[in-house]
Amino acid sequence: MSTEEGGAQRGSQVSIIYKQNSGGAGRDPEGGPCCPSAACTSCRVCLAMSKSAVKISLDLLSNPLCEQDQDLLSMVTALDTAMKRMDAFNQEKVNQIQKTVIEPLKKFGSVFPSLNMAVKRREQALQDYRRLQAKVEKYEEKEKTGPVLAKLHQAREELRPVREDFEAKNRQLLEEMPRFYGSRLDYFQPSFESLIRAQVVYYSEMHKIFGDLTQQLDQPGHSDEQRERENEAKLSELRALSIVADD
């Protein structure tokens, strides 16, 4: 195998590893394979939902009906307290995810511009190496006259530092990129564990909050079917009023 063929083969290995790290062909390696925007969007949606729930409970509290019915006021007050507790835990969960998941993702993605630049420098060195290697081979194929031998010697001297530069860059990538690729699991494992813990704490608290709310609002001895029948009966009474009767 010639020196150029060996370099080309090692270059192919670098390309394969590089595609694995950058997410494959067609992906922008400067952006990296990890995009935290989806996690950010999910957090924003969760916060928006809990803020909306708090606003709804506050609007209900300010409704004049609550001033007229003490039982309704007690129910809405319990709902408002539960929604505020939910919002507080939701904010805590989002802060935890931001700190332990989103920020590490951003930091991990920040290394890809440097990685991309190292690959580009290696590719440029390979092009220079191939150009000068072709020049050497051209003189080697010619008749060995004095001028040709002189030019061949000069071309080989030009090739030597370029070849050494390429081989150094290529060797560095072959050694370091597999380590970089293999370390990603060790890097992300703590983030995944923190995400799972945050979700467990959040949903455990949500179960407790809504369990407490159910106990406060629940009417003993009433099944869901009974509540549905009662609601239908009250709705029928409203429909029977002349002001809402069909024309």
Image (cartoon, grey):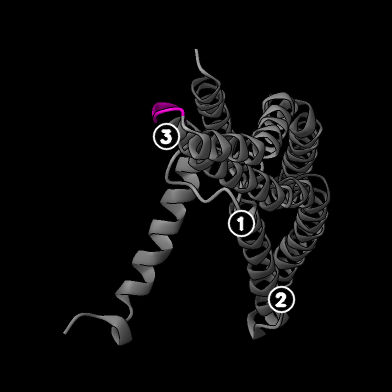
What is the distance, in whole Å, between disc 1 and disc 2 at their CAs? 31 Å
Which one is in front, 217 or 206?
A: 206
Q: Position of residue 70 (x, y in %)?
A: 74, 71
Q: Which of disc 2 and disc 1 is earlier in sequence?
A: 1
Magenta-tinted stretch: 140-144
93 left or right of 49?
Answer: right
Bin the neighbour count of mark 2 within 10 Å (Cα to Cα): few under 14, some 14-19, many 20 and up: some
Task: Report the residue at 44% width, 50% height from top.
Answer: 228
* Residue type (three-letter) at the residue carrying disc 2: Leu
143 part of magenta stretch: yes
Circle nearer the viewer, 3 or 1: 3
Any part of residue 23 in sight: no
Q: Position of residue 167 (x, y in %)?
A: 67, 30
Tag 3–tag 1 contact (CB < 8 Å): no
Looking at the image, how many numbered discs can be counted on the residues? Answer: 3
What is the distance, in whole Å, between disc 3 and disc 2 at their CAs? 84 Å
SS at circle 3: helix
Task: Report the residue at 58% width, 29% height from top.
Answer: 14
Task: Report the residue at 45% width, 34% height from top.
Answer: 139
- What residue did someone put label 1 on? 37
Task: Report the residue at 78% width, 46% height from top.
Answer: 104
- What residue did someone put label 3 on? 138
Circle nearer the viewer, 3 or 2: 3
Q: Determine which of the numbered discs, if any, sits on residue 58 in the image.
A: 2
101 left or right of 139?
Answer: right
Tag 1–tag 2 contact (CB < 8 Å): no
SS at circle 1: helix
* Residue type (three-letter) at the residue carrying disc 1: Ser
Which one is in front, 69 or 135?
A: 135
